Image (cartoon, rainbow, N blue to C red):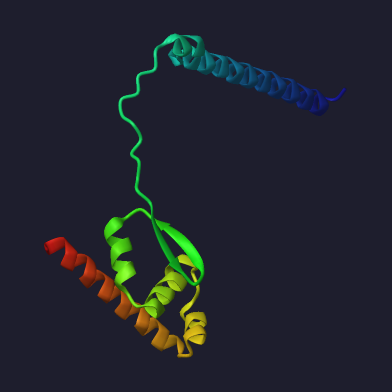
Amino acid sequence: MTEDEAYKVHIQYTFNAFCKVVIRHAAIDKVINLRRRWEREVSLDYLMNEKFVQFAEPEQLEEYLFTACGQTAVLYHAELAAALALLPEQTQEEIFRYYFMRQPQRVIGVHIGRTRSTAGRHIQLALKRLRRLMEGKRYE
């Protein structure tokens, strides 16, 4: 074995020893971290033996049905449901198609026989009317 080959073998053994030390210390760190986590965790048996006290009951929301285009949506806001009921049927359909069915203004315009921009304007006006109806009830 030449001196050059002996040096390469020495370097290989040194590198292997270094890798073994690094892997060993990584394993030790992992064991220490797991032990710390286990010490902090609460036992499931302990939790099962504790009495469960419910601090509050889940809030029961009233459901209001909004029907348009032959479909029904469930609303949880009484003022919004009442204001939508006061709108004309075509306006209700436009709002339902845009906000509940997620149809683009172009499709809504084709359905009502108008252009896309006109359908968008109808939706804007319907929202303004809804806002006025809801604010009017709030101040009465």
Question: Which residue occupies the extreme right position in the image?
Answer: 1
Q: From the viewer's perspective, is 65 left or right of 24?
A: left
Residue 50 location, quadrant: top left
Please identify the residue farthest to the bottom as the structure is shown. Answer: 114
Q: Residue at x 70, y 21 (%)?
A: 14
* Quadrant occupied by the C terminus: bottom left
Q: Tell me where residue 81 appears, x and y as whole percent.
A: 33, 62
Seen from the viewer's position, the closer of residues 39 and 50 is 50
* Most distant residue in the left direction: 140
Percent x, y of residue 66:
41, 63
Q: Position of residue 9 (x, y in %)?
A: 79, 23
Whole-percent x, y for residue 113 in the image = 48, 90
Please determine whether, in this image, residue 47 is positioned above or below residue 101: above
Front-most of 68 and 14? 68
Q: Is residue 139 above or below residue 36?
A: below
Quadrant in the picture for residue 124: bottom left
Which residue appears at 80% of the width and 23% of the height? Answer: 6
Judged left or right of residue 35, residue 83 is left
Q: Quadrant of the N terminus?
A: top right
Q: Residue at x 35, y 41 (%)?
A: 60
Report whether 100 appears left or right of 56. Answer: right
